[in-house]
Image (spheres, grey):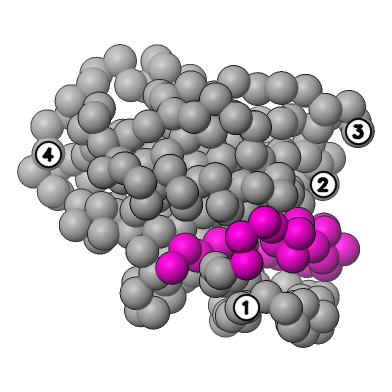
């Protein structure tokens, strides 16, 4: 079974809309894992509104950032033997056929990663973004086979709060063979440009993003070293910067 992992910190109304997009999925057999990053607002109450979803609510003991929250969700997915995962940010949406389309492609191929296109919403104006097979910066619009992640010891960095998705995907793309990933030219994920997000709209955030980009690269190099993997694509950093 597939799992959708949603890290969340406050902003319950955003989470409500994300979960509503899961209620509207054309495929109804999947598991939803909401990981509350020690929110000050009542996130569990929002989760309780969605009885139609197979939903697990997990709360972290302290605010640790999206990397730690996603890793907690991934660990739970391993625990209950989910065979694949999709990551959904709490302020984004999945298009109605996303779960069905991505899981179909994964189940009918030997691929360990399926990549789709996304819709980016800037100030309520949707725009089309073509991700392409080598898009590694974001988790958006992708489905990962869990056996591949476990076999290759791929995890999220948990000691910095931005670019953790880049650190994760750099490890994915280094471990994966070209024939084990597949791109489908279909828009399945709606990304919303949220002015209140951790990465947005002030000089300090830009500085932190730059520092955490370096942290993500350092995390990637350490991953290759610790898992005795060669750095297969030296230009991988230019592709994602």
Q: Residues within 10 Å of mark 3 (few under 14, many from 20)?
A: few
**Quick check: marks 4 and 1 in contact, CB under 8 Å?**
no
Q: Residue at x 48, y 22 (%)?
A: 132
Which quadrant of the structure image shows residue 118?
A: top right
Tell me where the magenta segment starts and ends, as one range.
1-28
Which quadrant of the structure image shows residue 183?
A: top left
Q: Which residue is mark 4?
A: 229
Per the image, label 2 sits on a secondary structure element best described as: loop
Sequence order check, earlier mark of 1 and 3: 1
Residue 99, horizontal then vertical, whole percent: 58, 53
Q: Which residue is mark 3?
A: 124
Q: Residue furthest right?
A: 124
Residue 211, placed above or below residue 40: above
Residue 228, horizontal then vertical, whole percent: 8, 43
Residue 190 visible at all: yes
Q: Nearer the viewer, residue 84 or 120?
A: 84
Which is closer to the viewer, label 2 or label 1? Answer: 1
Q: Residue at x 47, y 52 (%)?
A: 103
Per the image, label 1 sits on a secondary structure element best described as: strand
Residue 10, magenta (yes or no): yes
Q: Which residue is mark 2?
A: 196
- State how far apart marks 2 and 4 are (Cα): 38 Å
Which quadrant of the structure image shows residue 44?
A: bottom right
Q: Which residue is mark 1?
A: 55
């Amino acid at each position: 079974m597939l799992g959708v992992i949603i890290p969340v910190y406050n902003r319950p109304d955003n989470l409500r809309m994300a979960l509503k997009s899961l209620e509207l999925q054309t495929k109804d057999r999947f598991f939803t894992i909401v990981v509350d990053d020690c929110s000050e607002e009542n996130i569990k109450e929002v989760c309780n509104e969605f009885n139609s979803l197979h939903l697990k609510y997990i709360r972290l003991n302290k605010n640790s950032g999206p990397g730690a929250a996603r890793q907690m969700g991934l660990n739970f997915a391993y625990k209950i033997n989910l065979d694949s995962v999709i990551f959904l940010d709490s302020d984004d949406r999945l298009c109605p056929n996303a779960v069905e389309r991505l899981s179909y492609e994964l189940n009918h191929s030997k691929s360990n990663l399926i990549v789709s296109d996304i819709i980016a919403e800037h100030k309520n104006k949707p725009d089309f973004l073509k991700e392409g097979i080598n898009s590694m910066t974001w988790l958006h619009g992708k489905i990962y086979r869990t056996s591949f992640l476990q076999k290759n010891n791929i995890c999220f960095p948990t000691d910095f709060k931005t670019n953790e998705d880049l650190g994760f995907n750099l490890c994915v793309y280094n471990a994966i063979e070209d024939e084990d990933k597949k791109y489908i030219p279909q828009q399945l994920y709606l990304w919303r440009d949220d002015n209140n997000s951790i990465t947005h709209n002030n000089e300090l955030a830009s500085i932190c993003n730059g520092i955490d980009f370096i942290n993500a690269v350092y995390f990637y190099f350490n991953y290759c070293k610790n898992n005795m993997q060669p750095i297969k694509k030296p230009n991988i950093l230019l592709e994602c910067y």
